[in-house]
Amino acid sequence: MGVAKLDARTGRVRSFTQMLTERQGERLPQRLEAVRQDDLPSLHVLAPGVDRDRDAVIAGPALPWNSSVVEGHVNGIKMFKRQMFVGRASLYWKIWVYFR
Protein backbone atom coordinates (compact mmCIF):
# COMPACT_ATOMS: atom_id res chain seq x y z
CA MET A 1 0.00 0.00 0.00
CA GLY A 2 1.39 3.34 -0.99
CA VAL A 3 1.61 6.51 1.00
CA ALA A 4 -0.98 8.15 -1.25
CA LYS A 5 -3.58 5.49 -0.39
CA LEU A 6 -2.77 5.78 3.29
CA ASP A 7 -3.17 9.56 3.13
CA ALA A 8 -6.49 9.18 1.29
CA ARG A 9 -7.77 6.68 3.86
CA THR A 10 -6.69 8.94 6.71
CA GLY A 11 -8.51 11.85 5.09
CA ARG A 12 -11.73 9.89 4.73
CA VAL A 13 -11.62 8.65 8.33
CA ARG A 14 -10.96 12.18 9.58
CA SER A 15 -13.87 13.53 7.55
CA PHE A 16 -16.19 10.92 9.07
CA THR A 17 -14.88 11.78 12.52
CA GLN A 18 -15.46 15.47 11.91
CA MET A 19 -18.96 14.76 10.65
CA LEU A 20 -19.78 12.82 13.83
CA THR A 21 -18.21 15.24 16.31
CA GLU A 22 -19.86 18.25 14.69
CA ARG A 23 -23.19 16.38 14.51
CA GLN A 24 -23.58 16.75 10.75
CA GLY A 25 -25.41 13.53 9.94
CA GLU A 26 -27.06 15.07 6.89
CA ARG A 27 -23.66 15.05 5.17
CA LEU A 28 -23.42 11.24 5.32
CA PRO A 29 -24.71 10.48 1.78
CA GLN A 30 -22.05 12.71 0.21
CA ARG A 31 -19.31 11.16 2.34
CA LEU A 32 -20.40 7.62 1.45
CA GLU A 33 -20.49 8.46 -2.24
CA ALA A 34 -16.97 9.87 -2.00
CA VAL A 35 -15.81 6.65 -0.32
CA ARG A 36 -17.36 4.58 -3.13
CA GLN A 37 -15.54 6.66 -5.76
CA ASP A 38 -12.13 6.17 -4.10
CA ASP A 39 -9.85 3.23 -4.79
CA LEU A 40 -9.86 2.13 -1.14
CA PRO A 41 -11.29 -1.41 -0.82
CA SER A 42 -10.93 -1.39 2.95
CA LEU A 43 -13.41 1.49 3.17
CA HIS A 44 -15.74 0.01 0.54
CA VAL A 45 -16.74 -2.57 3.16
CA LEU A 46 -18.09 0.25 5.34
CA ALA A 47 -20.57 1.71 2.86
CA PRO A 48 -23.07 -1.20 2.49
CA GLY A 49 -23.33 -1.63 6.26
CA VAL A 50 -24.06 2.04 6.77
CA ASP A 51 -26.57 2.02 3.90
CA ARG A 52 -28.57 -0.75 5.56
CA ASP A 53 -29.28 1.48 8.54
CA ARG A 54 -28.90 4.89 6.89
CA ASP A 55 -31.75 6.63 8.75
CA ALA A 56 -30.38 5.70 12.15
CA VAL A 57 -26.84 6.66 11.21
CA ILE A 58 -28.00 10.06 9.95
CA ALA A 59 -30.23 10.66 12.98
CA GLY A 60 -27.61 9.56 15.52
CA PRO A 61 -25.33 12.58 15.37
CA ALA A 62 -28.17 14.97 14.52
CA LEU A 63 -30.42 14.28 17.53
CA PRO A 64 -29.60 15.63 20.98
CA TRP A 65 -30.37 12.34 22.77
CA ASN A 66 -27.80 9.65 23.47
CA SER A 67 -27.35 6.59 25.63
CA SER A 68 -24.29 7.73 27.58
CA VAL A 69 -25.94 7.43 30.99
CA VAL A 70 -27.22 3.93 30.26
CA GLU A 71 -23.82 2.84 28.94
CA GLY A 72 -22.21 4.22 32.09
CA HIS A 73 -24.55 2.18 34.30
CA VAL A 74 -23.95 -0.97 32.26
CA ASN A 75 -20.20 -0.40 32.49
CA GLY A 76 -20.47 0.00 36.28
CA ILE A 77 -22.48 -3.22 36.61
CA LYS A 78 -19.94 -5.14 34.55
CA MET A 79 -17.08 -3.78 36.66
CA PHE A 80 -18.93 -4.78 39.85
CA LYS A 81 -19.45 -8.31 38.52
CA ARG A 82 -15.76 -8.57 37.60
CA GLN A 83 -14.78 -7.49 41.12
CA MET A 84 -17.12 -10.07 42.62
CA PHE A 85 -15.58 -12.82 40.49
CA VAL A 86 -12.03 -11.77 41.35
CA GLY A 87 -12.88 -11.62 45.05
CA ARG A 88 -14.48 -15.05 44.98
CA ALA A 89 -11.60 -16.50 42.97
CA SER A 90 -9.04 -15.15 45.44
CA LEU A 91 -11.09 -16.58 48.33
CA TYR A 92 -11.07 -20.01 46.68
CA TRP A 93 -7.32 -19.69 46.13
CA LYS A 94 -6.74 -18.82 49.81
CA ILE A 95 -8.85 -21.78 50.95
CA TRP A 96 -7.03 -24.12 48.58
CA VAL A 97 -3.62 -22.91 49.79
CA TYR A 98 -4.66 -23.11 53.46
CA PHE A 99 -6.00 -26.67 53.29
CA ARG A 100 -3.33 -28.04 51.01
Image (spheres, rainbow, N blue to C red):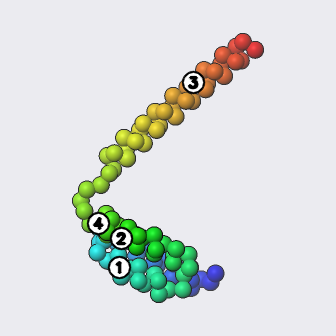
Q: CA distance from mark 2 to mark 1?
A: 9 Å
Q: Are marks 2 and 4 in contact (CB under 8 Å)?
A: no
Crowd around label 3: few <14 · some 14–19 · many ≥20 (10 Å): few
Q: CA distance from mark 4 to mark 1?
A: 12 Å
> Which label lies toward us, 3 or 2?
2
Q: Which residue is mark 2?
A: 54
Give the mark nearer the N terminus: 4 vs 1: 1
Q: Is residue 45 left or right of residue 14?
A: right
> Which label lies toward us, 4 or 3?
4
Residue 23 picture quarter = bottom left
Residue in the image at 28% along x and 75% along y: 26
> Which label lies toward us, 2 or 1?
2
> Compared with residue 78, is residue 71 higher up or lower down, i.e. above or below?
below
Residue 21 picture quarter = bottom left
Residue 70 picture quarter = top left
> Compared with residue 68, is residue 7 higher up or lower down, i.e. above or below?
below
Q: CA distance from mark 3 to mark 2?
A: 45 Å
> Compared with residue 71, is residue 29 higher up or lower down, i.e. above or below?
below
Q: Which mark is residue 60?
A: none
Crowd around label 2: few <14 · some 14–19 · many ≥20 (10 Å): some
Q: Which mark is residue 59?
A: 4
Q: Which mark is residue 29?
A: 1
Residue 64, position in %: x, y? 24, 59
> Which label lies toward us, 2 or 4?
2
Q: Amino acid at mark 3?
A: Arg
Residue 48, position in %: x, y? 46, 74
Q: Can you say which quadrant of the picture contains the N terminus?
A: bottom right
